[in-house]
Amino acid sequence: MKKMLPVICLLAAGSAFAQVPMQTTQDYAQGNRLIINGKPLFISGMNIAWHNFARDVGDQAINGTTFTNTYLKPIKEAGGNAVRWWLHTDAQVDPKMNMSTGAVTGIGTNTINNMRTVLDSAYKYGIVVSMCLFSFDLLQNDGNKSQDEMNRNYKFLTEPANLDSYITNALGPILDAIGSHPAIMAWEVFNEPEGMSTEHGWATQKIAHSNIMRFTSKIAGEVHRRTKKMASTGIHEYSSGELSRYTEAKLKAAGPDNDGYLDFYMVHHYPEYWGANGSPFKHPASYWNMDKPILIGEFPARSWGNGTGYTAGKANETAMTITAAFEYAYDNGYCGAMSWSMTEGNSAKFGNLSTTAPALTNLYNKHPNDINVLAAPASSSSARSSSSVALSSSSRSSSSSRSSSSSLAASSSSRVSSSSSARSSSSAAPSSSSQASSSSQASSSSSSEEATPIILTQTQLTSNHSLQYYNLKGIPLGSVKPKEPGVYIVKNTKTGQIQKVAVK
């Protein structure tokens, strides 16, 4: 008969996995970490980017179980901690707009509910979500928009009063309802807005870049005023000309909005378009000489270069395995890396979860305390909200206030067409991360093992209580005591007590 030796690691005030309250601590970016809900994190994950292109929000209710099992749970099982999710995207169904003027009149009946459903599940699994509001697809017509819709979107982006109507009737209600959800990594204004710029964009219709800057500044300002979360945007490339557009001073002036800045930069890279000079995987983050931390927000989900399925253009010049890419980002000053994508239609070229999973597992095994959202830093008890679960100690410390110093693929038709083809696929590739999930039940990070144990009797542990078991990555295992020897997390659902137990 197996023995269960209960050990308290830390007690969480309140239920950790019940209905999730908004956080009260301020997130910020510092150096090569994002401090989210009091926990310094290296972001290691993937783009989802959508389950149903432009329709994950709106009047239609999302299936939370399907979304969780298809995207969130597999990322967690692979050892990742983050996903990027596109929301309004090209405004096909949300927000609601006046067709003739481009003014926003409201949001879908399930927009907030769908966001909350996904975020609550992400919190349960220890996943943070980049909430990407819009994309250059607003002005890209792949046969999915009428000319009236294209004209409406153009007016929405170029007329200041229409942006004000979006803030009043859509963004404001969203941020007030779920804007400070602890599972939010950041509110991301745009995906690759340069694609719709008159300067060198590739979208069907284009606007002056000054409109993009004003829009970005105003949205970021609202995020900072209304929430405890960070603001960012998905920048198309690592050229100095693109990155330097979005400095704090330039964005504040563009609004104008004194709160309208980005806390960190999310920049994309597709090696077929750029040689070593334009690659984040050949230069440390400091090379770009920016005023905020940098996260690699998109790059192929597979190895690239000779001998791989990704050899187009200049890919051979910077050949790299996907595992080495994640390691390079971690070792060279970036605050995270998120590959593209779980729903990519052309997965033979770009890869998918099955090709990225080994890299996520490798990085987690090497640096669990920097990736595990559920592992709390040793000094974070005062910084985390009362509902946060703290499972292990770490040498890292964090501040509950924003740091003063951190107040914080090239344009081509092939990139667009590959993005378009991806929209036809709404299901993710099956996960190949069994290694991560099977090993996670019996293994733990060194910091978890080093926590000073407090021994309880079996009666104290189980008397009049309902228990739920999790592995050390926070993945739910159910209410039945695990039989496989190893260390587990057990949560008392009545008292909210979180404990670590050893099954022998």
Image: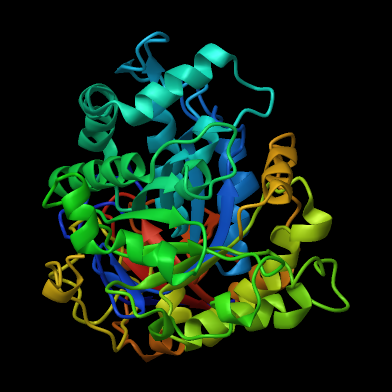
Residue 231 place in picture, x, y as percent? 29, 53
Q: Please, is residue 318 above or below residue 125 in the view?
A: below
Residue closest to the eye, 19 or 459? 19
Q: Is residue 403 left or right of residue 274?
A: left
Q: Residue furthest front?
A: 199
Q: Is residue 426 left or right of residue 443?
A: right
For the point 43% across and 36% down, which residue is it?
Answer: 207
Residue closest to the eye, 492 or 102? 102
Q: Is residue 44 visible?
A: yes
Q: Quadrant of the C terminus?
A: bottom right
Q: Please, is residue 415 above or below residue 353 in the view?
A: above
Q: Is residue 439 visible?
A: no
For the point 31% across and 74% down, which residue is it?
Answer: 376
Tally the numbered discs: 0
Q: Is residue 248 left or right of residue 55?
A: left
Q: Quadrant of the N terminus?
A: bottom right
Q: Is residue 374 left or right of residue 52?
A: left
The image quadrant that residue 26 belongs to is: bottom left
The image quadrant that residue 107 belongs to is: top left
Q: Residue furthest right?
A: 307
Residue 200 place in picture, x, y as percent? 53, 50
For the point 49% across and 69% down, which residue is it?
Answer: 238
Q: Please, is residue 55 above or below residue 280 in the view?
A: above
Residue closest to the eye, 5 or 58? 58
Residue 46 place in picture, x, y as percent? 57, 59
Residue 441 place in picture, x, y as percent? 59, 72
Structure colour scheme: rainbow
For the point 60% across and 49% down, which residue is it?
Answer: 71
Q: Please, is residue 127 above or below residue 487 in the view?
A: above
